């Protein structure tokens, strides 16, 4: 009998539940659709590309300003298990959100194994601080700052919500709302996956960067979304974050997107009828775009 390595899962079961490329064999097809839609968005929308928020070449963001200044700002962190992905391939939903009145900031960050997950967490927080201090120059309202992210980006959202911003001389409630989408919230699971050869988590760094051990502070409402067709192990992490955050006093909403898996859930963001999209727009006080 194969031994279990994490919460009753064998190694093979763990790969299926916690590595989306195993759970969605045709994942590349979905990624290609997202990439093509992102390319169209970059060509069609007014944007400021590769705006630095840090020192490395990947510490840059693309800013898609709303037509009318003074509206809310949505920061988005892409996924890729901290080891792949780019902002260029993750702005597919920009047209809908910009049309609705949001200024969208899509953040890029350094990747493992060049840097550690803890470094990426710090970069994400630095990007948020930069946007807060500078977004008014691009027409956004820093007093209406929202964050979102998918997969590894969902993890970065959760870790940003756990941060004490006052230590940086910023308002503790500088984030007004957040959407964590199909995130990785218990990094102990990642220690046992093949992808950790690139991510290089240790038991100590997994503990230091696990949102289930560093819960969001009760300063901003949080949408926790997961695909209804994702493996039960992945869904359970989202459910745990929801329950623990709610117990801590965080205003939370749990959204299970029917039929969505780890790759298709992001492709639903440009759909104004998607329950997650509607909830994100509502959180920002924006009408659903037609």
Image (cartoon, grey):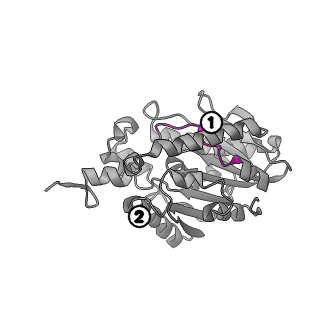
**Callout 2: SS:** helix
Whether the magenta-drawn stretch holds residue 106 is answered as: no
- Residue occupying image coordinates x 76% and y 59%: 289
Residue drawn at x 71%, y 44% as measured from the top left:
131
Q: Position of residue 78 (x, y in %)?
A: 56, 44
Which residue in the structure is indicated by mark 2? 236
Q: Residues within 10 Å of mark 2 (few under 14, many from 20)?
A: some
The answer for how far apart the CA atoms under marks 2 and 1 are is 30 Å
**Front-lying residue, 126 or 149:** 149
Residue 88 disc label: 1
Asked where in the image residue 62 lies, by quadrant, the reply is top right
Query: Is residue 15 in view from this perspective?
Result: yes
Query: Which SS does the magenta portion mostly show?
Result: loop
**In this picture, which residue range is highlighted in magenta?**
83-94
Residue name at image x 60 percent, y 27 percent? 57
Q: Quadrant of residue 54?
A: top right
């Amino acid at each position: 009998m194969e031994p279990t390595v994490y919460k009753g899962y064998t190694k093979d079961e763990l790969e299926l539940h916690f590595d989306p490329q195993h759970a969605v064999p045709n994942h590349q097809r979905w990624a290609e659709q997202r990439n093509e839609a992102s390319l169209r968005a970059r060509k069609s929308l007014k944007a400021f590309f590769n705006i630095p928020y840090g020192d490395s070449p990947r510490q840059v963001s693309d800013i898609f300003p709303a037509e009318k200044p003074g509206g809310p700002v949505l920061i988005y962190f892409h996924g890729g298990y901290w080891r792949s992905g780019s902002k260029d391939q993750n702005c597919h939903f920009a047209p809908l959100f910009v049309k609705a009145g949001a200024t969208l900031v899509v953040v890029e960050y350094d990747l493992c194994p060049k840097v550690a997950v803890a470094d990426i967490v710090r970069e994400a927080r630095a990007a948020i601080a930069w946007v807060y201090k500078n977004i008014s120059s691009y027409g956004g309202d820093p007093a209406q700052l929202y964050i979102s992210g998918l997969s590894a980006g969902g993890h970065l959202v959760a870790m940003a919500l756990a941060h004490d911003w006052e230590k940086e001389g910023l308002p503790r409630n500088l984030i007004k709302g957040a959407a964590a989408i199909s995130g990785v919230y218990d990094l102990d699971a990642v220690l046992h996956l093949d992808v950790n050869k690139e991510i290089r988590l240790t038991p100590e760094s997994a503990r230091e960067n696990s949102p289930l051990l560093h819960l969001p502070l009760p300063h901003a409402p949080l949408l926790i979304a997961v695909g209804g067709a994702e493996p039960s192990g992945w869904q359970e992490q989202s459910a745990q974050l929801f329950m623990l955050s709610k117990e801590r006093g965080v205003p939370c909403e749990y959204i299970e997107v029917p039929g969505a898996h780890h790759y298709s859930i992001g492709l639903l963001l440009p759909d104004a009828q998607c329950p997650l999209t509607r909830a994100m727009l509502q959180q920002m006080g924006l009408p659903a775009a037609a």
